[in-house]
């Protein structure tokens, strides 16, 4: 049996113990099941990239089993702390060390519509309510999805652009090639840029960008959510 398959089976066998831990802490069942939905994402990624059922990133699930990452709606949230002071439009400053969550976007799930994103933010605000700084949910995201050059080449109606607009982009890194290319092109990644598939609008946009520029990147953003609306300094 492939090691990827064994890894996934071992992780799944530990899920009843995880459910018991959730029950002891009275964590809602929907949060448990939302967290487990990432198993499907990792299974489908492994099936696409390696052609077998399993997971090639078993270490990723440490956060889930250590109760440090929770699935809430479309997103998953890692419990973290703010590294630097962060000013708000009303003059308040959220201090370094305040509670925040890091946002992870599972590769498979509902489209990132406004309604889907806001539903997750609202539910996360409620779930983490006892830890929030002055009632504010601070969310960070570091991802290729946050690449600041996206507005230059993604379609204007791109849901990736809508997701990016939720955040105040405060950091970026450009890099040669596209280390996350497999996330967009699947098993076809590794072929010459000119031979990459164009089955989706994202693939078409990235293919042309790679052919023209040959570089991609990542962005780092912060979002502050008060339970109903986003109140970033630079929306």
Image (tube, rainbow, N blue to C red):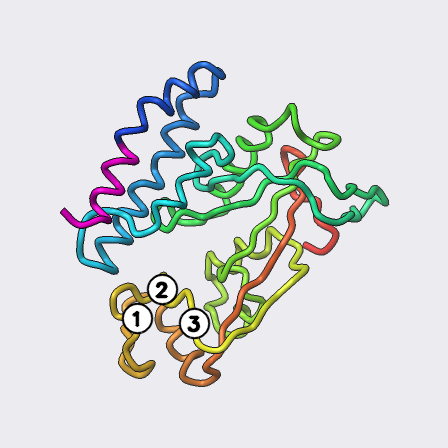
| Among numbered discs 3 and 1, the one appearing first in the sequence | 3
Within the image, what quadrant is residue 64 found in?
top left
| Magenta region | 1-12
Please name whichever residue, 13 or 223, is drawn nearer the observer in this view of the structure.
Answer: 13
Taking the view exactly as shown, the residue that stands out farthest to the left is 1
Pointer 3 with pointer 2, Cβ within 8 A: yes
Q: Is residue 130 left or right of residue 200?
A: right
Q: Nearer the viewer, mark 3 or mark 2?
A: 3
The label number, if any, that marks residue 184 in the structure image: 2
Helix, strand or loop for disc 1: loop
| Among numbered discs 2 and 1, the one appearing first in the sequence | 2
For the point 40% across and 84% down, which residue is it? 211
Q: Residues within 10 Å of mark 1 (few under 14, many from 20)?
A: some
Q: CA distance from mark 3 to mark 2?
A: 10 Å
For the point 71% across and 30% down, which residue is it? 135
The label number, if any, that marks residue 189 in the structure image: 1
Tell me residue 23's x, y (percent).
Answer: 42, 16
The label number, if any, that marks residue 210 in the structure image: none
The vertical placement of 32 against 217, above or below, is: above
Q: Nearer the viewer, mark 2 or mark 1?
A: 1
The vertical placement of 152 against 129, above or below, is: below
Q: Residues within 10 Å of mark 2 (few under 14, many from 20)?
A: some
Q: Which residue is mark 3?
A: 178
Please name whichever residue, 226 or 47, is drawn nearer the observer in this view of the structure.
Answer: 47
Q: Main secondary structure of the magenta part?
A: helix
Pointer 2 with pointer 1, Cβ within 8 A: yes
Please name whichever residue, 13 or 217, is drawn nearer the observer in this view of the structure.
Answer: 13
Q: CA distance from mark 3 to mark 1?
A: 10 Å
The quarter of the picture where the C terminus appears is: bottom right
């Amino acid at each position: 049996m492939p090691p990827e398959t064994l890894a996934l089976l071992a992780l799944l066998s530990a899920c009843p113990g995880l459910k018991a831990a959730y029950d002891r802490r009275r964590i809602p069942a929907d949060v448990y099941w939302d967290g487990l939905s990432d198993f499907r994402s990792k299974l489908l990624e492994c099936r696409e990239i390696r052609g077998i059922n399993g997971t090639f990133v078993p270490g990723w699930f440490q956060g889930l089993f250590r109760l440090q990452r929770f699935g809430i709606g479309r997103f998953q949230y890692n419990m973290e702390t703010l590294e630097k002071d962060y000013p708000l439009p009303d003059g308040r400053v959220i201090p370094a060390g305040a509670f925040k969550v890091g946002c992870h976007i599972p590769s498979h799930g509902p489209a990132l519509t406004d309604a889907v994103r806001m539903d997750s933010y609202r539910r996360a605000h409620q779930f983490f309510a006892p830890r929030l700084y002055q009632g504010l949910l601070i969310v960070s995201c570091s991802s290729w999805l946050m690449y600041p050059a996206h507005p230059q080449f993604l379609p204007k109606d791109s849901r990736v652009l809508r997701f990016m607009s939720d955040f105040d982009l405060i950091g970026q890194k450009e890099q040669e090639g596209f280390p996350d290319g497999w996330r967009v092109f699947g098993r076809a990644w590794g072929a010459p840029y000119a031979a990459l598939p164009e089955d989706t609008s994202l693939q078409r946009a990235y293919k042309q960008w790679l052919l023209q520029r040959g570089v991609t990147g990542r962005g780092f953003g912060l979002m502050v959510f008060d339970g109903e609306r986003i109140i970033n300094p630079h929306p």
